Amino acid sequence: MSLIESIRHQEQALAALRRSWEAGRTPHAYLFWGPPGVGKTRAALALAQRLLCQSDPAPCGECPPCRRVARLTHPDLHLVLAGARAEEDPRRDLDAYAQEPYHCLDIPRGASIGIERVRGLKMEASKARVERGGRVIVIRDAERLTPEAAQAALKLIEEPQAGTFLVLTCEYPSHLLPTILSRCQRLRFRALPADFLAEVVRGECGLPEAEARVVAGLAQGSLSRAIELARAGAGALRDEALELFERPVGDASEAVGRAQRLGRQWDPARARLAVDLAMTWYGDLLAVRHGLGPEGLVHADRLAQLRVRAQALALPQIRRRVAALEEMLEAIEQNVNPALALEAALLRIQGLDEQQKQVDPRAAARSRRE
């Protein structure tokens, strides 16, 4: 089976790909853009199969070049990942990606693609191809190109070698140089349906229906994120976050104690996920207040609880909770200790932030300093 047959819910983009290659007018540079984890990289590899396949019609998915593309071992296929220097070969992660249909390539936060990597690509593009056919270069997450690397990539696109095809992928085209955009044919990839995501995480991760629905709602149309959330135990963390943010406290000291007990167990990634879960909860509360049925809710398995809380919380209280969570997320992104960020958010959610300042006027300054 060719890789293009394994991509789901991207009919419009795949139809455009097929039209171009059936007409024999494949552009030398593509930009596949859209949310992460929706099939952009696999579509780029499917295009590589088409260009490197030795059968007619192509891609057959069965000939040696097609198999080597699927295993990411074809000598004329170059896949560039953020965080990998020119001399590095992240083979273990690539092998897992080739073997597992839902494997998530692990890209560190803040990782970039440096100019050395692009210079290496330019050198490869100047060499003779190893096998009959073309050469395909895939630059994944092209928005991670450093400014110098982006300029070098532009030269690679502007001065293509015969038979060399480039595919860049990114989430937002506006994050790339306008000159790169103008020289690439763009194909948009859409967010995946929540029902499909829930079905996959049920099958791949063994989640029960209710938890799979929560994960699918949080994933924002991204299959890789849905798998990541399922494996991180998003369902259990949802219960933990609701217990933390929704259960009333008596005073500021109780709120601080609760935040400190849980915050010590939260690294930044887990804290971000907890905030995402809580934000979707308050989004559901607003939806329930406006009469939306369970079909549109992330936390539909907690519908009875949502209805009770929607009646109990006034709109200003919900807005205050959302603002507190947004501030918590911003603090974590600025490397504030998650326990301190959680403490500040919980105090504000419970309306105890002013009380805490009176008890300990150094608290706010300490949080900012940390």
Image (cartoon, rainbow, N blue to C red):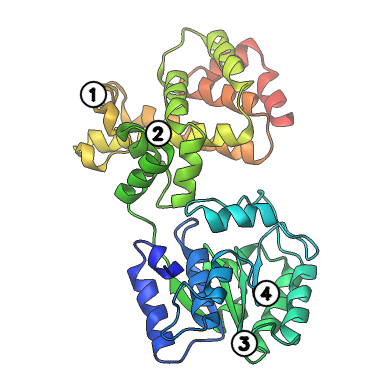
Amino acid type at circle 4 is Pro
Q: Secondary structure at mark 3?
A: loop
Q: Secondary structure at mark 1?
A: helix
Bin the neighbour count of mark 2 within 10 Å (Cα to Cα): few under 14, some 14-19, many 20 and up. some
Q: Is disc 2 in contact with disc 1, using a CB cutoff of under 8 Å?
A: no
- Tally the marks: 4
Instruction: Give how far apart the Cα atoms at labels 3 and 2 are.
Output: 61 Å
Image position, residue 245 (x, y; %): 45, 22
Amino acid type at circle 2 is Arg
Instruction: Give how far apart the Cα atoms at labels 3 and 4 are.
Output: 11 Å
Going from the N terminus, do you reach mark 1 or mark 3 first?
Answer: 3
Q: Residue at x 70, y 59 (%)?
A: 112
309 sits left or right of 62 in the view: left
Q: Is disc 3 in contact with disc 2, using a CB cutoff of under 8 Å?
A: no
Amino acid type at circle 3 is Arg
Q: Which numbered tag is attached to residue 132?
A: 3
Going from the N terminus, do you reach mark 4 or mark 1 first?
Answer: 4
Q: Which numbered tag is attached to residue 333?
A: none
In front of the other: label 3 or label 2? 3
Residue 170: image quadrant is bottom right
**Which part of the image, by quadrant, shows the C terminus?**
top right
In front of the other: label 4 or label 1? 4
| Above or below, 2 relative to 367 | below
What residue is pinned by disc 2?
319
Image position, residue 188 (x, y; %): 43, 70
Bin the neighbour count of mark 1 within 10 Å (Cα to Cα): few under 14, some 14-19, many 20 and up. few
Bin the neighbour count of mark 3 within 10 Å (Cα to Cα): few under 14, some 14-19, many 20 and up. few
